Amino acid sequence: MPPPQESDLPPVPDDEAPTQVSTQLPWSQIPKFVPGTTNVQEYTQKLKFLAALWPTDFLDQLAPRAALLVEGTAFKKIARIPPQKLKVKSTDGIAAIVEAIGGSWGSTELEERYEFFEKSLYGTVQRNDESHDSFLSRMEANFVELIARNTTLEEVQAYVLLRQSTLSADDKKRILLEHGGELKYGPVVKAFRLLGSRFFNEFQTGRSSQKK
């Protein structure tokens, strides 16, 4: 009987392929989280970006690695997450980490836009030990993000009006919800004047505008 030809032999399974793929993944790009230092929104965006690029077969390794890079008091919250919730081949593990540190995995585009409004206009301040180039770079990055979202001057004006007003948080939310979450100066001004009118205040408190 002639010996089997090489083409007739069963293929040898390549056990090294998954290991090679795993070592080529950008593990060093997984961000650290330091309470009081790391910006939660930026940290969440980085994890979302990494999770979207990560091969599905290795997502069960991404969340545990990210969890070990959380430091300080925040790690105590991470440690309460059951390991089986982190070792999953989906983004659920990363989402659990984000929510544990106080972030929002499912934030809407509208929420993210308002976060960039706040960070660009009020939250980016030059630190005492920060160079001018570093501060300029952070400031430009925030405004580049706003421009990329097609932000208009009208939206900025409406945001500043609400932000600097003495309206309660509930009233500000009410104005946004009444206009579908859009920041348009004209409608915001009308709602703002209504909330500040004497009639509206008396109507809300149930008092008559006429003196008895």
Image (spheres, helix red, strand yellow):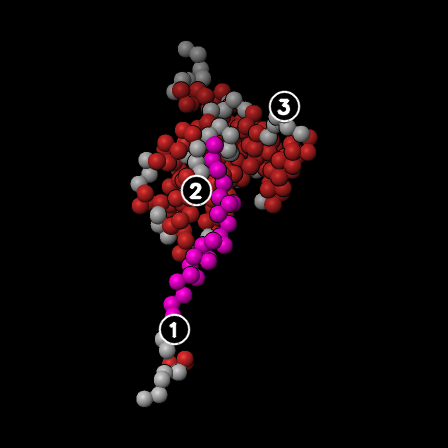
Q: Magenta residues, as a range?
A: 11-34
**Quadrant in which the N terminus is drawn:** bottom left
In depth, the one of 25 and 108 nearer the eye is: 25
Q: Which mark is residue 21?
A: none
Q: Are marks 1 and 2 in contact (CB under 8 Å)?
A: no
Which residue sits at x=60%, y=30%? Answer: 124
Q: Of circles 1 and 2, which is in front? A: 1
Q: Is residue 14 magenta?
A: yes
Dot placed on the residue nearer the N-terminal end, 2 or 3: 2
Image point (60%, 38%), residue name: 142
Residue sitting farthest toward the top: 212
Give percent across and percent down for residue 76: 36, 31
Please give the residue where the numbered disc 1 appears in the rendered image. Answer: 11
Q: Which percent across, then down, holds residue 150? A: 60, 45
Secondary structure under the numbered disc 3 in the rendered image? loop
Among numbered discs 1 and 3, the one appearing first in the sequence? 1
Can you tell which quarter of the image residue 140 is in?
Answer: top right
